[in-house]
Amino acid sequence: MSLPPLRIGKKKAEIPIIQGGMGVGISWEKLAGAVAREGAVGVVSAVGTGYRHPSMVKRDRFGRPIGSIYTHSKEALTKIIQDAKKLSEGRGLIGVNILCAITDYGRVAQDAVEAGADLIISGAGLPMKLPEYVGDADVALVPIVSSARAMNLICRSWEKKYKRLPDAVVLEGPKSGGHQGFKYEECFMDEYQLENLFPSVLEEAKRWGDIPVIVAGGVWSYQDIKHYIERGAAGVQMATRFIATYECDAPLIYKEVVLNADEEDIILLKSPVGYPLRVIKTPFVERLLAGYNGWNGCVSHCITPCNKGEEAKKVGFCIADRLGAAWLGNYEEGIFISGANGHLLKKQGIISVKELLEMLTGKRPDPTLQAEAFIK
């Protein structure tokens, strides 16, 4: 089966694969640019961009950006997007993933538009005001949803207030890396799994004029992609598989942590964001599970639900600090993220983005599927 192109509003990518946004520092210009250059959708994360270009921001003595204006730096994000576009050589699309939960969400959305993003993907909450921040700019808007009800709420609100609808939606199931749009217990219940959520969201999308539905959260292989496209999906979003590429912006230690993870090492934690967070067991996580509180005060003011460190203190860590530590290569103190199927990457090792996309489009054998296939 030859995969169809992905159309999102006025935008088009030849390969119907979106590389998911991964912050802090896992998907910035190198990864996004390489993915787009192959004809797919490369996505940079808008979270913690101050870590990427420290010379552009004000930092404390430990290297942490001070305050949201520097943590989610406009200047750094602009450079990341523009550098990604240069690396793409005019192919594919460059998107930006912006968590609804971040402080200065509206400002960061405007920053992404001004920097030339082709699309904005937004989750970790419902992006009810996103159209207000982008105005009439030529940028596609793609909310992340976890149910048909969430999609209906967004569509009704956007149509009433802004006279527009999403250009596409990403339906993300509970097997993704990072923050989940479900309660802890729901992540393991059959009715909340991607394959069971998909039919109702696809039906809701048709009610609003065939809005493209992109599926995510556990999608792993060419077989999975075919499975969902044959059933009506416009494309897929995948993140974890892109970590094990040469072009991924993560430091080598981050890639090694993911490549060495066993299935039982990938767990869910409570997060200051207010959603379950899927991570890999590492020294800091082990200490956290044993009752250690590693919160060191609020410096970055990175997310609004944390209430300037109150929630971080309760769960024992600042998400910006720990993701920032991982980006800086600190194995002992960092938090490292993976999707539920990340343990399969050890069968593959580190490869190029080109090789990975050839696997995901059926042009190259996939070593991660030698022992088991996935549609789950």
Image (cartoon, rainbow, N blue to C red):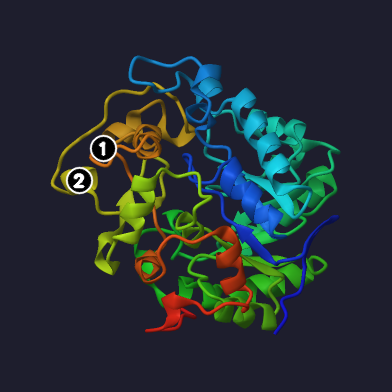
Q: Which residue is drawn at the image coordinates 59% and 58% (left, top)?
A: 145
**Image quadrant containing the N terminus:** bottom right
Which mark is drawn over residue 333?
1
Q: Does the image show residue 62?
A: yes
Amino acid at dot 1 = Glu
Provide residue 322's location: percent of width, then percent of height. 34, 37
Q: What distance separates the C-alpha of mark 1 from that of mark 2?
A: 7 Å
Residue 49 location, quadrant: top right
Q: Which residue is mark 2?
A: 283
Q: Would residue 364 appear left or right of 128 to someone viewing this image? A: left
Amino acid at dot 2 = Pro
Q: Which residue is drawn at the image coordinates 62% and 48% (left, top)?
A: 32
Question: Pointer 1: residues within 10 angstroms few (<14), some, or many (20+)?
Answer: some
Residue 56 location, quadrant: top right
Q: Would residue 283 appear left or right of 115 to someone viewing this image? A: left
Q: Are marks 1 and 2 in contact (CB under 8 Å)?
A: yes
Label located before the other in sequence (1 or 2): 2
Q: Which residue is drawn at the image coordinates 41% and 69% (left, top)?
A: 348
Label 1: state its secondary structure. loop
